[in-house]
Amino acid sequence: MREFLVEITTTVPEGVGQDEVDRRRAAEAVRARELAAAGHLARLWRPVGELRSVGLWRAADEGELHEKVLGTLPLSPWMTFTVTPLEPHPNDPDGFRADAPR
């Protein structure tokens, strides 16, 4: 699977009730755990003082990432995504581990 850095900003539309927001957020947490268990969500961060998220996601390609991964998030209709495809860097410290594949 390829890796992608994904910035996510969620904007709740005006007029949406708090019950709906709470329901979707709870479903979002469940779906995030499922995607992590399937290997699609590797890490997720929230920059200090901000309401956006930054995550390391995995998928076969960008099409699958949007359609079968990010598009399945319950909050996705309210989200904007900035996707950056990643590739290994020759100086990645993980590559220096004795047990790392060469």
Image (cartoon, rainbow, N blue to C red):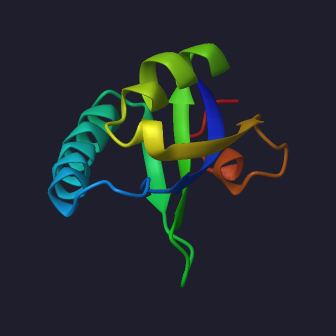
Image location of residue 11, percent across then percent down: 49, 57
Image location of residue 12, percent across then percent down: 42, 56
Q: Could you tell whether 5 is left or right of 67 in the image?
A: right
Image location of residue 99, percent across then percent down: 55, 41
What is the residue that sits farthest to the right in this orientation?
90
Q: Nearer the viewer, residue 89 or 19?
A: 19
Q: Could you tell whether 55 is left or right of 16 in the image?
A: right
* Placement of 94 over or under 52, stated as above or below: above
- Residue at 70 percent across and 56 percent down: it is 93
- Residue at 31 percent across and 42 percent down: it is 32
Image location of residue 53, percent across then percent down: 52, 60
Q: Nearer the viewer, residue 67 or 85?
A: 67
Q: Nearer the viewer, residue 28 or 23?
A: 23
- Residue at 32 percent across and 27 percent down: it is 38
* Placement of 30 over or under 101, stated as above or below: below
Q: Could you tell whether 71 is left or right of 64 in the image?
A: left
Q: Quadrant of the C terminus?
A: top right
Q: Is residue 47 visible?
A: yes
Q: Is residue 61 visible?
A: no
- Residue at 55 percent across and 24 percent down: it is 65
Total numbered circles? 0
* Placement of 31 over or under 20, stated as above or below: above
Q: Quadrant of the N terminus?
A: top right
Residue 34 placement: quadrant: top left
Residue 41 placement: quadrant: top left
